[in-house]
Structures are given as C-alpha cells and as structure tokens.
Amino acid sequence: MKLALFDVDGTLSDSQAHILAAMTQAFAGQGLAVPSRERVLSIVGLSLPIAIAQLAPAQDAATQAALVEGYKQSYFTGRAASPAPLYPGAKDCCLRLAAREDMLLGMATGKSRRGVDALIAHHGLGGLFVTQQVADDNPSKPHPAMVLAALREAGVEPSDAVMIGDTTYDVNMAHAAGVTAIGVSWGYHPVADLVAAGAERIVTSFAELEAAIAEMLP
C-alpha cells in the first residue's frame, strides 16, 4: 500500500482569512500590535503555542497563553459562521486517490482535532483519511512524529509515502521521517522556500499533484 499524507491549512483548505482574523483579534484583545500578514502566514502549520511564541517572543508565558486562548475562541467563532473553503479540485483529487486500490490517504496538520473533525464533516470528507495526525497528539512540525505515527497507523514504509504541503515545515518534517515531499504552489510559503528546503517536486494544481503522486508512487 501507498500513503499520500496531506497538510490541511494552505494545502487542502484556504483558511487564511480565518487565521488572519483570529490572530488580529487575539493580539488586539491583549492590547498588542498585530503582526503583519506575512508574519502570520509564515507560522501556519506550526502548533498554535509554538506559532504564538514565534509571533510574540517578547511576551511572558501568561500573555502568550492568553493569545492562544484568544485565537482559539476567535477562530472557532469565525469558522462556525463561515467554514473555510477547500481549494478548487481538492476534494475531487482526494476522492480519486482514495479510489485507488493501493492508495491510502492521511492528514498531518497543525490544526486541532476539533478543527479537523469540523472540516471533514463540513466538506463531506468522512472516511477518506485513514490516519489523522493533529497538534493535540504530536509535537509541532517540523518534528517527524506526525509522519512517523501516520506511517505506523497505515502500515506503510517511508519509501511508499509522500507528504504534500505548502510550507517548509512540511518539507522538513517529511525528510526527517525519511519521506518524499511534494510542495504546492498555492499555499502560504513562497515556492522558492519550498525548493530551498529540498521539496522533491513542486506542483501548481491538484491535477498536477495527482499525476505527480501517480508517478512517484506507481
């Protein structure tokens, strides 16, 4: 069996509007200057406490914890009002891959379990992902724990898996686990950064991604 392991935010789902709005409210709620769009998107993929620590390194632990809670409350309120969309072609690509007799799908994401469950339910993705590795249960990317846990759950060797993501954290995590990395051009880190991190392939559409997976995991 083969395993196609997907990041979520910036790869399957375009959640930047939710992320930026929630981060703005979290920082404003603590009376702090709001980080720039570029800085916020640069930490997408990291577990939330790690991301906040990078965005507000000068703040004490209590303030960072308050930022984390403020972000969570704002994000879930925004998501409930208007769930983040999938990128065009994402669902169809996953459905076709899952239909392969030799292919398993998984997720490795900095999102929470609650966030992943909500996204799967809203977009009708139930049953597609045999392993779902989330921030609640694993160290933050780029630690390889998520990929290693996904490989164990799926019963797949690293040589038979690919990690698909939009950030250098995804690429570095994949390589730390001995897995090939495919970078997507439509996410939150510049393509040049993905190339510099060593992504074995860069794709510009889900059709191209599907073809790349078929070639790399024949």
Image (tube, rainbow, N blue to C red):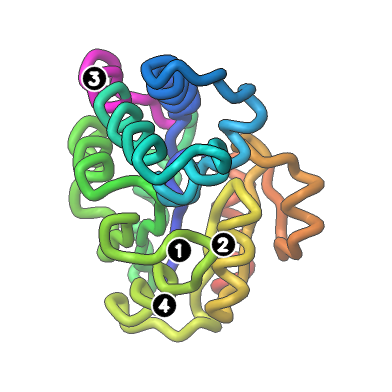
User: Which of the two discs, 1 and 3, sits closer to the camera?
Assistant: 3
* Amino acid type shown at disc 4: Leu
Q: CA distance from mark 1 to mark 3?
A: 31 Å
Q: Is residue 152 above or below residue 144?
A: below
* Amino acid type shown at disc 3: Thr
* Amino acid type shown at disc 1: Ala
Q: Is residue 76 magenta?
A: yes
Q: Nearer the viewer, residue 149 or 67?
A: 67
Label 2 crowd bin: few (<14), some (14–19), many (20+), radius 10 Å: many
Q: Is residue 98 above or below residue 9?
A: below
Q: Is residue 49 magenta?
A: no
* Secondary element type, mark 1: strand
**Labels 2 & 1 near each other (Cβ < 8 A):** yes
**Labels 4 & 1 near each other (Cβ < 8 A):** no
User: In this picture, which residue range is highlighted in magenta?
Assistant: 75-86
Residue 215, image x, y percentages: 63, 67
